[in-house]
Image: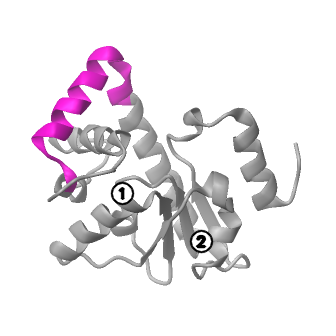
Amino acid sequence: MQISNVTGTAFVVAEFCAEENRAPHPLYRDTIVNLFLTDASQQAAARVAAGFPPVREMVKIRTRYFDDVLERQLSSGCRQVVLLGAGLDTRAIRKSAANVSYFEIDDGSTLSLKQDCFQRHGIDANVKFISGNYVADGLMALLSRNGFDPDLPTYVIWEGNTMYLPIESAKAIIERAMGKSW
């Protein structure tokens, strides 16, 4: 697998998620994430964790939290799931459900790597990979060009990337999506 122009944070988060598979009492199982990992990603994750050790557990706990909330949403009739800054997230496979479509927005290189990896391993997921920047390109514009139905019950997962955005950008995204201002 050739990796170029893929954000390093995607691999670091994937490494931390994969570690839970080896835990004696795991918070969740994610065997799909292992498909993306290499010695280089393991070394990068070790460097990040050495600089801020709690980050490992933070990623694992938030993964479990969003998995639990997503399961409740799916059982309550959610028909679409949107993942902003999806990275190497595997929920479209791990949490697939009948009549539920996933929309993953991230940079094109990350999504291409992910899609290629799924195809090589014969993994079929009901996911629309949307290459774009939801801040600059507009969340609703990206979604509407890719088959998103604003009238269907939808759950949005905005996990782990708001810390990289100025507060004004985060507010603007929500305002545009909801049609409300703060």
Tell me where residue 71 appears, x and y as whole percent: 48, 61
Above or below 1: residue 75: below
Q: Residue at x 67, y 34 (%)?
A: 166
Q: Amino acid at mark 2?
A: Cys
> In the shown orientation, is residue 5 left or right of residue 159?
left
Q: Amino acid at mark 1?
A: Thr
Residue position for label 1: 110
Residue 51 located within the stretch drawn in magenta: yes
Helix, strand or loop at label 2? It is: loop
Report the span colored magenta: 36-57
> In the shown orientation, is residue 57 left or right of residue 4?
right
> In the shown orientation, is residue 66 left or right of residue 92?
right
Q: Earlier in the sequence, mark 2 or mark 1?
A: 2
User: Magenta stretch: dominant SS?
Assistant: helix
How many numbered tags mark residues here? 2
Dot 2 alpha-carbon crowd within 10 angstroms: few under 14, some 14 to 19, many 20 or more = some
Residue position for label 2: 78
Q: How many angstroms separate mark 2 from mark 1 (CA)?
A: 26 Å
Tell me where residue 55 appears, x and y as whole percent: 38, 26
Front one among 171 and 5: 5
Which residue extends farthest front? 5
Helix, strand or loop at label 1? It is: helix
Q: Quadrant of the N terminus?
A: bottom left
Give the label, 2 or 1, closer to the camera: 1
Occupied quadrant, residue 182: top right
Front one among 112 and 68: 112
User: Is residue 114 at all visible to an observer of this figure?
Assistant: yes
